[in-house]
Amino acid sequence: MQEEISFLGHIVSKKGVQTDPAKVKAVKEIQSPKNVTQVRSFVGLASYYRKFIQGFSKIAKPLFDLTKKDKKFHWNQDCEDSFLELKNKLMSAPILAFPQVGGNNFIFDTDASAYAIGAVLSQVQDGKERVIAYGSRCLDKAERNYCVTRREMLAVVFFTKYFKHYLLGRKFLLRTDHGSLTWLQRFREPDGQIHRWIQQLSQFHLVIEHRPGNKHGNADAMSRLVTSDGEICKQCAMPWNYSYSGPVKSEIKEMKEGEVATLSDESENESERPERAGASPVRRGRKPNRPKQAKQKKKPSSELDNLEFIRQQQEEDDVLKEILKLKLDDREKPEREEICCESRDFKSYIARWEQLVVKNDVLCLLWQEDVGKPRLKICIPRSITDEVLWYLHDAKTAGHQGVAKTLEKAKISPFYWQGMRKSVKYYVSKCEICGERKIQHLRRDTL
């Protein structure tokens, strides 16, 4: 009985599928292309066997660039390296295993680099993790502008759809070396593109697992070779050696200086203001029916941009003081049993243990935005949150906005504290000026 067969340039056997040696034997003799036509021919041959080549799009990108319209042919070292690597990959292509539908769950590894995304679908068979298929594609011009987290999420969304016939209707493990993707299934109130992507992924039964990059070599190796530190989204990325005295301090200064507005002086005499056209004059002998003027809260006197002030406030707070001590002692993350009797705030900080860092003896948190790398934020105790909220809500340029907009300001501010949403909601609800405005609106509606 025949154990293998040649079919459309592939060898199909009980072990799996591999390239036909007779077809790729001539690859060794191929010389470097001399024009665009030859490049297209080679890329076409390599593309036919791309499912056997891990990171095909990343490797072949210099050759793809040469085939673009109106692109002048220039064979450089990058093109030569790409050409030689593809030849070697074709001549040593691995055997892809057949999927066992009733066997173990599939393992799905994804990765993204500055200009390409890739994935590896595998399954544990006979005690060994065997590759079922590779996938990769280059990013277009718009996608290359995505921040790192958005590119990583794009890889997940694109390749779950690409391997949908394997993954839909069964549980599988999604492995990634990008820790930010672990929030994918607990993301609250997404909007725009993120919302659409999460909806697409909701049809799959996936379990997300983060593993370090040095263990994520099957999907990550190529991107680690080509991605530079400079490939960072300008809006949402911050270097990991972020300094308190630099960007953070300037953000605090900007927040505080925003209070100095060029608005009209509230102490201006009423009689000096020009009368509005069409306004009804106030009759003599009758006092105007005006609501009682709400008092504006006084500007805080604390030095939020003073490093010593921040240190002192953290030292005086029981929770932050203990967390700071653990971090300075380079302790491991406490186990759940160790903190069972601690406060809720303490447990919340421990849950973010990997995000907590100490800069200049100040406890900070790497805050994760909806997309992008974390931003460094200073952890502050509840005792001074009202002072921060004054600048975000009561200052002249803040405009006494509602809960949602004030919360958005708090999220992009250089400070972090536990219970941010709840404290913002409470602060706004107790604002006398906002309350007075609501009363005035109600009075107009009843007239």
Image (tube, rainbow, N blue to C red):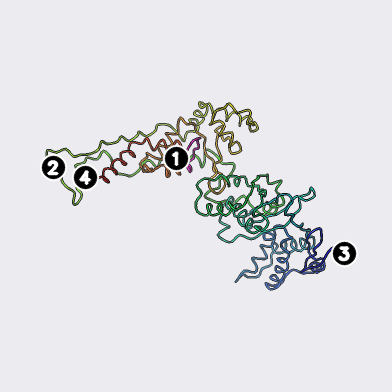
Q: Residue at x 59, y 45 (%)?
A: 180
Check disc 1 and report the residue beneath it.
253
Alpha carbon distance from label 4 to label 3: 103 Å
Whether the residues at callouts 3 and 1 have beta carbons within 8 Å, the answer is no
Check disc 4 and report the residue beneath it.
273
Earlier-in-chain disc, 4 versus 2: 4
Please give left or right for residue 218 compared with residue 278 in the image.
right
Q: Residues within 10 Å of mark 2 (few under 14, many from 20)?
A: few
- x and y percentages locating residue 326 in the rendered image: 61, 29
Q: Is residue 416 one of those drawn in magenta?
A: yes
The span picked out in magenta is 409-420
Single out the residue that lies furthest toward the front: 102
- x and y percentages locating residue 53 in the rendered image: 73, 60
Check disc 2 and report the residue beneath it.
283
Earlier-in-chain disc, 4 versus 3: 3
Alpha carbon distance from label 3 to label 2: 111 Å
Q: Residue at x 72, y 58 (%)?
A: 133
Single out the residue that lies furthest toward the right: 1
Please give left or right for residue 232 compared with residue 382 in the image.
right
Based on the displayed image, in which of its 4 quarters is residue 388 positioned?
top left
Q: Secondary structure at mark 2?
A: loop
The label on residue 1 is: 3
